[in-house]
Image: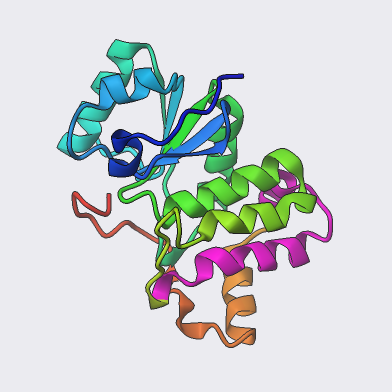
Amino acid sequence: MRSVRARTVGDILYNFHWVIPGEAARAMQAWAGGLSPFLKRRGIAAIINLRGRNDDLDWWKKETAIAKHAGIVHLDAMLDSRKLPTRDMLVQLIAAFDAAPRPFMLKCSGGQDRTSFAAALYIIHRDGWGAVTKARRQFDRFPYLHFPKTQQRWLKVFLDFAQADASGQALGRWIADSYTPEKLKAWLDANGLQGSYAAIFSAPTRSPFQW
């Protein structure tokens, strides 16, 4: 396992943190450049991009080209911070966790919302429901800068819904067999959280920054 270094300017600039030291990390989009040395210095072997496959956007083209040149595996998953995920979206995320060489790095645009959600799910996928308290810490305002807007409040409470609905079943199996966004919506509404999400996901709202 790689040793954990003191945080650098690059770590702060790209909101980089280890989720599991030497195994899984989290960060934002590398807008300021220098992605290749940033990844090399931290020994990253794979990127799990939470913004989805976007062949027509420059950031995606650049990111995948850099990864290919550096021999880093690039995997695409898709999440929306305001729209409830479909089963297939979560199945693909779990599959990316399992397929990614270690250490891998989760990233979205700002590394605050979708990345917090994915990091929390990874901890539960890895360590089971006994790690749910540890997983919730991935949503801390500091150091992760998770300041959810009204329609992003479902992200953290998803863990409560999932734990209750899974009834001890492993996260990945529960997602594949039982999860539906309609069930999540009904649970949120029943718990007074009708305004915590925008809709059930159907299609991304395209912009270079969200996607």
Does residue 195 sit above or below 34 in this rendering?
below
The quadrant of the rendering that contains the N terminus is: top right
Q: Main secondary structure of the magenta part?
A: helix
Q: Quadrant of residue 193?
A: bottom right
Magenta stretch: give its range. Answer: 151-177
Give the residue displayed 52% in from the left and 70% down from the top. 154
- Residue 64, how many percent across, how many down? 29, 25
- Residue 142, how many percent across, how many down? 45, 58
**Residue 176, magenta (yes or no):** yes
Give the residue displayed 40% in from the left and 55% down from the top. 112
Q: How is the image coloured?
A: rainbow
With 20 as the anchor, is 57 left or right in this view?
left
- Residue 17, how many percent across, how many down? 46, 40
Does residue 180 sit above or below 49 in this rendering?
below
124 vs 191, nearest the viewer: 124
With 16 as the anchor, is 192 left or right in this view?
right
Q: Is residue 18 visible?
A: yes
Give the residue displayed 61% in from the left and 30% down from the top. 98
- Residue 43, how many percent across, how many down? 44, 19
Q: How many marks?
A: 0
Residue ranking furthest to the right: 168
**Residue 106, magenta (yes or no):** no
Q: Quadrant of residue 75?
A: top left
Q: Quadrant of residue 83?
A: bottom left
142 vs 59, nearest the viewer: 142
Q: Is residue 198 visible?
A: no
